[in-house]
Image (spheres, grey):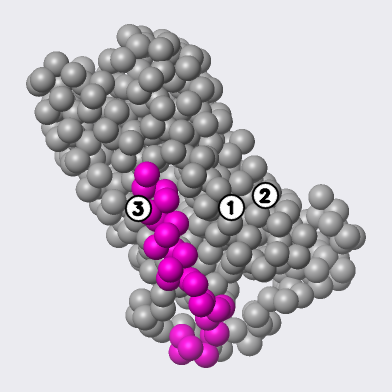
């Protein structure tokens, strides 16, 4: 990854972001994997567990706004440190919870803290990469979402084989503090990073908006972000599409159990393959738009072109209803989640493409909150459809409608994004003051 520079230090920063994102998704998956054990020990109902999940999602939505604003104010090094300490402590506190209410409180803390990961990571990419490499860098760190899920599927059973469920929370929560040591040692903004060669620094900062020291003197008025169509384009991309990934994340196990009699008490090769496919999509999607930009395409045109291509390809998820066996379904859903992550990677770069670095974290937080709110509302529709069709003895019909909705939503989102950014330009810092 030389790209004509005399150093690759910026890719070390991507490794840090990837590792943090992996830990982030590992920590959030723990309670779902421990659900059978915790239900038995604390006599939870399904409603109890649903409220615990809702507590996390609601806190996550609020946290995206708060940490998006805070990280733009205090910077990435301090902001990322605070957010990972916050969520790691909250993750470990699950070990001392003794009721559904106690776990709900721990999930609130986890949701608030974990919300800071993406605003901090995307802002870091904006600071450390020229526009032509940002999508690839984003795709690389975003691959941590799927790796975190796979690590959880492997790590939790291993810890349980030696210890109890409490130790699962203690050990996984402590991983954030290990990461923090490396972050504090190896991270700083490019202009202050002594390990960075002069040539690589020039490569990174060429074409970027302003010198960091000058930018610190010009605070951004957060509320003004809502007056720009560029912000609403990002809100659309997150608000309509993020809920689909939540569906893939939380309903796929029960879909396979009900449709193909998959035994969820054993390690599932099918689910591991599906979640691993998201890594391919995340990196591949980022590479494609970055490749087009290096070929001379305008940045926004490259992003929207690949988004449109992925939106059309995502229609293939509708074909799942015709899958005749479990492996055909695995293949189609693997393609669907890979395309989703390819889409998500390019949407994540829009704030750094369309806004100055000083506003990127705030825009990411706003869009992320829209995605989290959608993640609360979409399950209401899912539950209603599945209950209705289950009562009629046709649960598969409910899933077929949901897959059809998912497949078509990407094109709707792309059309709105396109119209909102048809004449868009990069927002100037002075416009936000």
Check the image and name the residue furthest to the left. Answer: 391
Indicate whether residue 242 is drawn in magenta: no
Q: Secondary structure at mark 2?
A: helix
**Which residue is label 3 attached to?**
240
Indicate whether residue 415 is drawn in magenta: yes
In the displayed structure, 54 sits above or below 231; it is: above
Q: Residue 225 at what x, y percent from top left?
A: 40, 78
Question: Label 1, label 2: how many angstroms apart (C-alpha)?
Answer: 7 Å
Mark 3 or mark 1: which comes first in sequence? 3
Tell me the tag on residue 288.
2
Q: Secondary structure at mark 1?
A: helix
**Which residue is label 1 attached to?**
306
Residues in magenta, as a range: 408-433
Q: Out of 343 and 151, give the one closest to the viewer.
A: 343
Question: Label 2, label 3: how many angstroms apart (C-alpha)?
Answer: 23 Å
Check if mark 2's residue and mark 3's residue have beta carbons within 8 Å.
no
């Amino acid at each position: 990854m030389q790209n004509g520079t005399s150093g690759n230090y910026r890719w070390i920063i991507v490794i840090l972001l990837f590792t943090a994102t992996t830990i982030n998704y590992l920590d959030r998956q723990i309670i779902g994997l421990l659900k059978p054990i915790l239900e038995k020990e604390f006599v939870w109902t399904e409603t109890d567990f649903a409220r615990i999940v809702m507590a996390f999602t609601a806190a996550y939505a609020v946290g995206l706004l708060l940490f998006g604003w805070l990280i733009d104010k205090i910077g990435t090094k301090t902001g990322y440190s605070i957010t990972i300490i916050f969520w790691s402590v909250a993750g470990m506190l699950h070990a001392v919870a003794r009721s559904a209410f106690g776990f709900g409180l721990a999930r609130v803390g986890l949701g608030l803290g974990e919300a800071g990961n993406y605003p901090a990571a995307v802002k870091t990419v904006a600071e450390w990469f020229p526009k032509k490499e940002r999508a690839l860098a984003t795709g690389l760190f975003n691959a941590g979402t799927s790796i975190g899920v796979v690590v959880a599927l492997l790590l939790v059973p291993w810890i349980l084989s030696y210890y109890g469920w409490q130790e699962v929370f203690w050990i996984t929560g402590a991983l954030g503090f290990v990461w923090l040591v490396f972050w504090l040692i190896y991270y700083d903004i490019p202009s202050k990073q002594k390990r960075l060669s002069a040539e690589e620094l020039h490569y990174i900062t060429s074409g970027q908006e302003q010198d960091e020291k000058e930018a610190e003197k010009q605070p951004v008025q957060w509320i003004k972000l809502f007056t720009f169509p560029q912000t609403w384009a990002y809100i659309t991309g997150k608000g309509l599409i993020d809920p689909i990934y939540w569906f893939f994340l939380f309903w796929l196990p029960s879909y396979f159990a009900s449709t193909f009699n998959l035994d969820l008490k054993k390690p599932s090769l099918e689910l591991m393959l599906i979640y691993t496919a998201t890594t391919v999509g995340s990196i591949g999607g980022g590479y494609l738009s970055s490749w087009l930009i290096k070929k001379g395409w305008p940045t926004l045109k490259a992003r929207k072109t690949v988004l449109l291509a992925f939106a059309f390809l995502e229609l293939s998820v509708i074909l799942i209803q015709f899958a005749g066996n479990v492996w055909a379904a695995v293949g189609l859903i693997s393609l669907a989640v890979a395309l989703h992550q390819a889409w998500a990677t390019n949407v994540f770069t829009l704030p750094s493409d369309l806004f100055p670095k000083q506003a990127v974290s705030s825009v990411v937080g706003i869009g992320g909150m829209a995605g989290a709110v959608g993640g609360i509302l979409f399950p209401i529709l899912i539950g209603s459809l599945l209950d209705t069709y289950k009562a009629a003895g046709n649960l598969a019909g409910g899933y077929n409608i949901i897959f059809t909705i998912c497949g078509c939503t990407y094109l709707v989102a792309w059309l709105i994004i396109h119209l909102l950014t048809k004449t868009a330009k990069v927002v100037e810092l002075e416009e936000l003051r």
